[in-house]
Amino acid sequence: MAKCTIIIILFSIISLGYGEIYSSFMNVQNLNYLEDHLLDLLKDYIAKEKERIGYLENFYNYVYGSKVDLTPDTYISYPTNQFNVIHRFVSDWNNLESYTKEIFDDPLFKAMHSYESLLPNDDDVAGAVKALHRLQDIYKITAEHFAAGWPLVDNSIYSKERERQLQGQPLDVKSLLRLTKTAYEEEDWRKCAAWGRQAYLNILKNNESPLSSTWFDVLDYFTFCLYKIDELSYAKELTELILEYYPEHERIGGNLRYFKKELAAADHDSDYDAIYGREKRSLFSEPLPFLGEIREKENVNITYVPKIRPGADKPNMTEDEIEYLIEDKEYNFWAKRMRKYRSLCKESAPLTPEMEAQKDRLICYYKGNTPRSLIKPIKVEEAWPSPKILIFHDMVSDDEAKQIMDLAKPLLNRATVHNKLTGKLENADYRVSKTAWLDVGLYNDREDVVRRVNRRMEDATELSLELAELQQVNNYGMAGQYEPHYDMATKGEKAFSESDGGNRIATLLFYMGNTEAGGATAFIDAGARIAPRKNAAVFWYNLLPNGDPDLLTRHAGCPVLAGTKWVMNKWIHVNDQVFTRPCDVDRYRREKPAKLYNGHYTQ
């Protein structure tokens, strides 16, 4: 009726000529009605603008509050903060346009559109979620720890200001739900339940409306994952809660009937908690037991592949059964290796008395065997006896490391690995980093830092770099890693061609980033763990003196837990080492540990 009145008033005013409104009280009266209507519309508009601006202010305060007093690099040194940045661009910044006015000369509007090609997509979020899950597996970090943003390194020795820098931003419910969904999709039910619990506690803390889709999704996923880890009592309890608000939901109702049936069949209602040695408790008043723990896969029987073909002593086995047995034993080998990898990434392995005795004989010394190193001797630390692993300290300065990283940044591409069968380079999920290859004489290498560092490598290793590969700089991403691998080609693999200089005889690995936790180099079969040391280089031979591969050099790059990881590799080839490292007929001879004789370094 009000709309009809306004329309009639409009027609009556339009029928008047311009300059005639003032001549009649009725015309002014009608105009006053129009102004009242416009005021009502303006009131509604202001309310919507306040809501819009309120959303933008809340978003700004949430993001800015987590970054205040932190440098950009310090903020993203915590893994969940890296995840938050990636996830926000997909879930929040993309939706922010609906809350901003499209004013084409506005800097915010122009910037959002100009950055569009640089922004992450859903695949990047999926990769970030898997990275957090990987850190949980390797470093035994609970979902609760990550969700709260607790420090990942010992903060007892730091000041209050530094302690703030070591913490992460607590995850919001959208992020927690995404982590829960990914664990669900991967059928990792224990992680799913752990992250689901954190999401559930978050909606309780923030009084999320049970009628919201977020509330329903959190409880839906959480309930199913509780069921999958045999927490049926809690699954039933949560399902009943969902049905209080969604009584007509057919699938949830079916779930409740099924949970009740399962509980009744096993008499869980009375005995379930007694079986597991715990008292009956409420899901809502106390934390759930066992959730968030990261457990190794149990009941994996580690065996060794026999020297004869599996099944040869069992003539009744079919070819399919034999192939299955081979695959099973290969999996057991892989499982054992990966357990050792995860263990070494977290802490050094226990040593046998013989290895302890060998380590006690390791020394540090200054090396000055070339004219340049006589002027500035190289600091050498023997880090491991077999295979012999050396650490050259202060191989680059802070300024040189920065120059090398700056040279590499515009050249970074996804890291590749050699395919064992084809010998070609290709991407692989087990190596997560970006690489750049640096040659001497780069147009922007004004101080010739690449050539300088190359000469220093020759002085330290006393090997020829004539046929060595270019310097490879690696920047590891979020939980970036390189799973157990060899640098050289082993028997059965396509070796490096003669034009490439033959096989890789040695590796020199530089640490240049500021890695605060994680990021160690783990030698899986030797049991060695070399923690990152800024500006130092780790050196080892990949080949035995007779040219055979040294199978104890299988190593891995552990994921970075806090900080950043920049490394530089130099792979040295065998063909031009005729005089620097002559072959030895004894294939079992290894590099002898250095020793002091009358105060002088000898071999």
Image: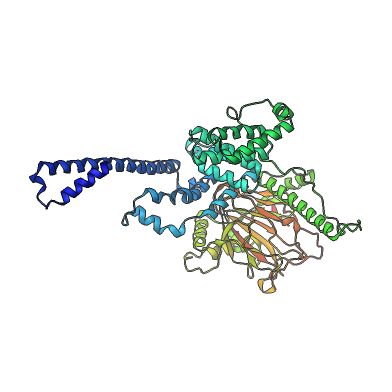
Residue at the (46%, 58%) spot, across then down: 118
Seen from the viewer's position, the closer of residues 245 and 297 is 245
Horizontal arrangement in the rendering, residue 225 relative to residue 100 (left or right):
right
Residue 110 horizontal/vertical position (percent): 36, 57
Q: The C terminus appears in which quarter of the rendering?
A: bottom right
Colour pattern: rainbow
Residue at the (60%, 28%) spot, across then down: 286
Q: The N terminus appears in which quarter of the rendering?
A: top left
Q: Residue furthest bottom?
A: 499
| Residue 292 seen in the figure | no
Residue 368, picture quadrant: bottom right
Horizontal arrangement in the rendering, residue 382 relative to residue 12 (left or right):
right
Seen from the viewer's position, the closer of residues 283 and 526 is 283
Count of labels in the image: 0
Horizontal arrangement in the rendering, residue 408 relative to residue 594 (left or right):
left
Q: Residue furthest left?
A: 23
Residue 348 horizontal/vertical position (percent): 69, 44
| Residue 239 seen in the figure | yes
Q: Is residue 558 above or below residue 66?
A: below
Residue at the (7%, 45%) spot, across then down: 23
